[in-house]
Image: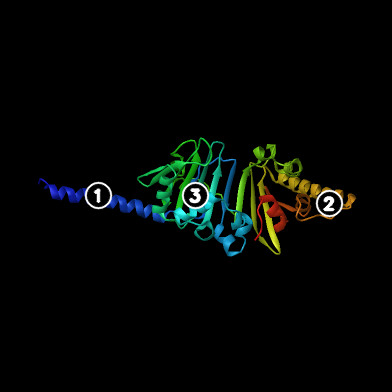
Amino acid sequence: MRLRFWQLGLLVIAVCGAGLAVLEYRRASLDDTPGALLARLPQQAPIRIAIDVGALRDAGLLHLIAGSKATEEADYTSFVEQTAFDYRSDLDLICASFHTNANYFAVKGRFHWPSLQRYATNQGGQCNNGFCTMPSAQPNRRVSFYLLKQNVLALASSSSGSNAYAINPDRSRILPREQPFAPVWWSVDAEETLKNPSLPAGLQYFLSPVRNGKRLYFGLQPGGNALQLTMQASLPSTVDAATASTELASRTAYLHKQLQLAKQVPDPSDLSGVLAAGKFQSKEHQVMGEWPIEAEFLNQFLGASAK
């Protein structure tokens, strides 16, 4: 039988509607845990981070990471006003990977998409089919973004205006997941980090026993009256791990001795005081380190002022 025109139209509408329904279902059902979002970002990044902003907010520690509201610049105030988005109340999770020529973010929170589109347009950008691109505050770079799902924004900053597409919703199904173990978590390429000239020489020397680890993992979380910094490194063998743990403990003891000779008491607000309080152990291929972090040191390190 020959389909009438209106019947053909209904068929096309039904097929398109079914396709959209499947797409929306897939978006809504996407795993938005830290490990899953990290897996969706481009891999092989020198630095990868995950910050559980919701956990920091609940613990009253968000100001230690974000700084005082009085220090915010006019650009941020304008962004909040035009997009109805404020990280203090609307942001829950940030996952990011930082590459040489591009930075990628998967941001979980509460977004008002029409306001984000208007903001991009007002900044000289454009939005088409749910994908936006706009000029960056950095020269020769552009920002691109789209909603990975209703509460997850995929965003990239690079020389290209389409790099947000590199945040792949299906990648997390086939890649092993990194599992953040603290509200503030980051991983770094061990070799690149320890060779970085911007890293203080004392810190390079102190961490050199774990230079054979492919990546170093760090976590910052509440611990007693201070924050607790944790390090994990996977070395080639159990012998390497045990040797690295012993060497880290030895260098900590040496630092203690030097402070005593100088008649100084370890100051928890100073890097030497933080390093002197370190404790280490190894288990199979893993080396673990722990350091208590006082708020004063964190404020100085981040350049932020506590409320």
Disc 2 target residue:
256
> Residue at label 1?
15
Instruction: Judge the density around disc 1: few (<14), some (14-19), many (≥20) Cα neighbours within 10 Å.
Output: few
**Given the image, on which type of amino acid does mark 2 rest?**
His
The residue sitting at the left extreme is 1
Query: Hey, which quadrant is residue 190 in on the image?
Result: top right
Give the number of marks.
3
**Disc 3: which residue:** 106
Label 3 sits on what residue type?
Ala
**Looking at this view, is 32 or 177 the one in front?**
32
Mark sitting earlier along the chain (1/3): 1
Position in image of residue 4 (x %, y %): 11, 48
Instruction: Measure how far apart labels 1 and 3 are at the Cα level.
Output: 31 Å
Q: Is residue 92 above or below residue 39?
A: below
Residue at 68% across, 43% down:
237
First reached walking from the N terminus: tag 2 or tag 1: 1
Q: Which mark is residue 202?
A: none
Query: What secondary structure is found at the residue carrying circle 3?
Result: strand
